[in-house]
Amino acid sequence: MAKSSEFGAFMEKFTLQPSPSQHQLPLSGLSFAVKDIFDIEGYVTGFGNPDWARTHLAATTTAQAVADLFTAGATCLGKTVMDEMAYCMYGVNKHYGTPTNPCAPDRVPGGSSSSSAVAVAAMLVDFSLGTDTGASVRVPASYCGILGFRPSLGAVSTVGVVPMSQSFDTVGWFARDPIILNCVGRVLLHLPDVDPIKPSQIIIAEDCFHLSNVPSDRTAQVLVKSTEKLFGAQCVKHIILGDYVKDKVPSLQHFMDKGNEDQEDNMPSSLAAISHAVRLLQRFEFKNNHGEWVTKVNPDFGPGLHERIWDAVKVTGENIDFSHLVRTELRAALIALLGDHGILALPTTPGEPPKVQENPGESDVFFSRPFSFLSIAGASGFCQVSIPLGMYDDVPVAISLVAKHGSDAFLLNLVEALYDTLQEETRKLKE
């Protein structure tokens, strides 16, 4: 099949099958694709940039997460296009093209795990692997109308994955079906089957939903009705997340400068400050990982990306200790809020996917606003899932659920329990 008929999803197509087994394996008969950031023995890991591919040899081993999927019986159909050096969240790549968003062809697919999401949304594979450091599974899942899971920090092995920022790097995955999402999660997380646990509370972040371009009756209210139907009205709580975080995370004061004290887009200053702290630490760790290579090779990067990567290479260690302190305080604050089986609900992103011709890679505005929402799970190390809720104004709509670090099995089971009711409530709105 020609690349054009596959939505521009694949960097390289091949078929790697699992070893034969006499037992019924959990992922037997399922196909998957892999973001070109994972090592597969015998193939060059391209990291979204031809200069990277040119200056690196073929991998001699296979990434642990990919090997786990083979062991579980899945078949790999190829490597997918990604944003250069995983440094953008929109899916634009000047070298390999912008993959077509099957859900909204005039919109970007999201990145940096762009084509991993596209391959699933286009039904080219049953599931796929991506990575999520800043948002790189959750954003493309949201933009392409599929499920995307970012696990708890450290829950899935990153051995054999090109690092970006180790304080935030996670291996995530996409699926169209919540049962497959859960099955893949069990394999990657090395978890046994456990009985679903009723959530103690589902907390609606009211301020975040009010900032969304999508009316809350299409998002928050769909979740509220579904929760009430399945678990009872007493399960639903509400919070002004920005106020709670501002009160409980005092170290954010170091990141509340004039640049984010008075937000033009009404983003709470505390959430913008989390984003600021996260991005500073990400840039610093990216520099430590790749600054020497960038300086030596002077790679050809796309517009906007060139400036951001070189800014990272020049970043200093100022305020890095405060970034780590924000992570510690935020994790403690969210543990206190959620407890063992609480859920925080918010929009995956506050806005719709940008149009392809807008080239969002060149605009920091496109980048900073959604990152304020997405940094909550990133900074705390909590797990998060993006769940599609149909279309609104011809673009995909999604909601996110966040659970405590280490509660991945609980969250995966909850998605499976909620999914059909969420879709049913969404359909009712169209009647």
Image: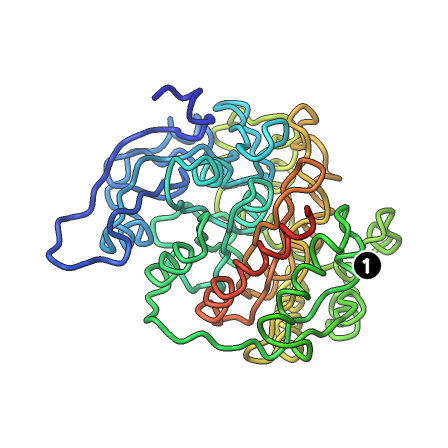
Which of the 4 quarters of the picture holds residue 199?
bottom right
Q: Residue furthest front?
A: 431
396 up-or-down from 190: above or below: above
The percent coordinates of residue 408 (x first, y second) are: 47, 67
Residue shown at 29%/52% (left/top)? 69
Q: Position of residue 223 (x, y in %)?
A: 65, 62
| Quadrant showing the N terminus | top left
Tag 1: residue type? Ser
Within-10-Å neighbours for mark 1: few <14, some 14–19, many 20+: many
The percent position of residue 15, horizontal first and vertical second, equals 25, 35
Q: Nearer the viewer, residue 235 or 65?
A: 235
Q: Mark 1 highlights which residue?
A: 269
Residue drawn at 36 percent across, 63 percent down: 186
Whether 345 is drawn above or below 30: the answer is: below
For this view, does 270 lie left or right of residue 398? right
Name the image colouring.
rainbow
